[in-house]
Image: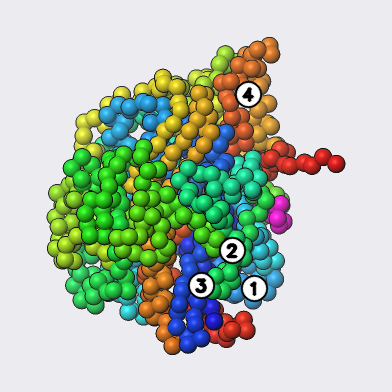
Amino acid sequence: MEKPKMALYWCASCGGCEEAVVDLAEKILDVINLVDIVFWPVAVDFKIDDVEKLPDGSIVASLINGGVRLSEHEHVVKLLRRKSKIVVAYGACSSWGGIPGLANLYDKEEILKYVYGDAPSVDNPGGVRPREKHVEEVELELPSFLPRLLPLDVVIDVDYYIPGCPPTPEVTWKALEILLSGNLPPKGSVLGASDRALCYECPLNNTKPDKILLKDIKRPHQVIVDPEKCLLTQELICLGPVTRGGCGALCIKAAMPCTGCFGSLDEVIDYGGKAVSYFASILDYYTEEDVERILDRLPDPMGVFYRYTLPASRLRGKIKTTMR
Amino acid sequence: MREVIINPITRLEGHGKIVVVLDDAGNCIKAYLQVPELRGFEKFAVGRHAEDMPQITPRICGVCPMAHHMASTKTLDDLYKVDPPEPAKKIREMVYNIFMLEDHALHFYILAGPDFIVGPKAPKTERNVIGVIKKVGNEVALKIIGMRKKLRKLNETIAGKVIHPVFGLPGGISRPLSKEVVEEARKISDEAIEFAEFTYKIFKDIVLKNEEYVNLITSEAYTHRTYYMGLVDDKNRVNFYDGKIRVVSPRGLEYAKFDVHQYLDYIAEHVEPWTYIKFPYLKKVGWRGFIDGEDSGIMSVAPLARLNAAEGMATPRAQEAYEEMYSMLGGKPVHHTLANHWARVIEIIYAAERFRELAYDPDIESRDVRKIPTAIPDVGVGVVEAPRGTLIHHYETDERGVIKKANLLVATQHNAARIALSVDKAARSLIKGGVIDEGLLNMVEMAFRAYDPCHACGTHTLPGNLPIKIYIYNTEGQLIKTIERF
């Protein structure tokens, strides 16, 4: 019997998702035995032409990581959508934009102006910028830098999500087992991770009181924590209560708060909004002066609460409006 | 005029592309390596909490996240003017050497291995990781996989996550090491020494005994006479974690030695319209275009450059290997790009020896691993040697520690101009009279693989065979021939 075909692709990613797959270690051999990987630029022959030649829908599943940032990414993911039965957003960037999605707080021109002009080491008196079409001896083309970074499901229809920055090998393996079992959950499901908040699997959960009321908020560099005690009770912004479990509480085991890379639980529309509302509910603050004080204690709520999810949030990022 | 497009270079981040331009006689007159990748980290860092940068910047590269994490953490020490307790510095440096060892070993065996271990002229079907396993044997292959797994697990335990670590904070690390972790680290460090020795033996037995390969290393096609840059300790020996930046000229003389705070006096970045990558060069020497030599500010970083820029290694076995390389290749500096693989093996030995030294240092058992910063933040600059070369972070903040400005000089960038030179030279030396054969693909592939370029983030990980497809167009823009190499 022919093995099911699978594809893996990266958009604006860091390569960490690819490493996460490689960290399956000896299990990667099982994957190779079970499926026929027809496309994986980082690891096997690049055969985009071959993908184009495949009949539509002939790839059983495509796992795509990274947000869509360049015109080239858009082209390839649309092709993979056409050729695949199932498309899976693999990792935080593909699912919701991830950390590179914070670039949506700035527009394209601001980014290019800084990177190629204002950055202190740049020596560019002629104001040269990389161009989509540039003629030297021949015409040299670069893919265009899109106005903003897009989560995968804004560009194409997505069937499932595997969360994490990156997803751990355990989560990846569980998700692959589900995909290969043929016993598929409803469309839009999150695969491989937990259905409950991170706190439930956190080793410090038994030190978390039923009711928390915070007098103050501290940033991680301002406090030496007790690694045996719930970080929330030590006034750190630990996002465990609003974040999907499944990672095994890796950061917390290293005495650092959860920053939310597994995203929200089912039914939550806006991760950052949910996180803000959770913290608003446990802060022992009542007056306007208190609000001023908290903003001073936490000057970058965007980077804290929307670190991995800004492009997929209700806020989306900086959007220019023009007056009529 | 015709163009030949090598597109895309798989396992190059953002699908790098090489365009070769031919004249009417079919001779190569120019080759371009284009890097179509841009995400704007320096811009969206603005507005973030400085202490979040050690977690934000590793997302630049998921293959070398520890390099960014460490450069960023050290930048925070400087930003908050806080000197971490000695045990914290030692644990950081230990973790860092574990990372260098694991990353370098992967490149040597999995990526470069097919060229070196199987041989540059072996049949294509064998020039991949399976071929490497066949040549070294199953037992050895399992040893390599096992070592990688242990080293990565250990770093996960200490740093929180191995891909995108979290333990670095201004003034130290998030928590001390438990007794069990210290014991585990010591045990693994013993194995690491053995692993490094064994890797060196493989390199000597298989590579250095192959005359053909040694000739290739020293051939003119892979030789560029550029400046070299790397971090050195107070005795001018290689150090990955800390030190001064030292630059030597193409003649091997010290051109500069400076503290990272002065980097803007020495390094500037040049912009080209046909690629998104910027090209750092030595500011005072100047940008003279894509040429090598004493008058061109192009410099090189990464293993060979680090060894060239230093006067030796700080550990005994690595020092022996260092002396051996320079005596075999005729003294310093070595300008042969392919000697990077050799230098990488020497650094594997150093990383293992340094890891072991630090693992057995009683300081790493200490509970004193954090100092809470008290100064008002303003400007911070930090540096480490990433596997692929010198990595500089520079942040400016307001008094609340919110980033106002960030500048990042990433390792592969420093090599970008020299990599462009290598690709151009390989293409020119091979493509003549319209003859384009598989040899070109081999040459081009080996020319830039030696640098282990970070646009090739994932490259370390899987089969070492670089698939390339060349499209050849005639002057009317019609596709007349394609050559594939899988």
CA gap, disc 1 to disc 3? 23 Å
- Color style of the picture: rainbow
Secondary structure under the numbered disc 1 in the rendered image:
helix
Q: Amino acid at mark 3?
A: Val
CA gap, disc 1 to disc 2? 21 Å
Residue at which label 2 appears: A142
Number of the front mark, 4 or 3? 3
Q: Which residues are magenta?
A: A152-159
In the image, which disc is placed on residue A248? none
Q: Note whether A157 is above or below A6 in the view shown.
A: above
Residue B418 seen in this snapshot:
yes
Q: Which residue is located at x 29 percent, y 74 percent? A: B220
Q: Amino acid at mark 4?
A: Phe
In the image, which disc is placed on residue A279? 4
CA gap, disc 2 to disc 4? 44 Å
Q: Which residue is located at x 20 percent, y 69 percent? A: B208
CA gap, disc 3 to disc 2? 12 Å
Residue at which label 3 appears: B19
Q: Earlier in the sequence, mark 1 or mark 2?
A: 1
Secondary structure under the numbered disc 4 in the rendered image:
helix
Check the residue under mark 1 and report the chain it is in.
Answer: A
Instruction: Determine if marks 3 and 2 fall on one subunit.
Output: no
Check the residue under mark 2 and report the chain it is in.
Answer: A
Residue at which label 1 appears: A52
Q: Amino acid at mark 1?
A: Glu
Residue A24 seen in this snapshot:
no
CA gap, disc 4 to disc 1? 49 Å
Magenta-span inclusion, residue B342: no
User: In what quadrant of the picture does the N terminus of chain A appear?
Assistant: bottom right
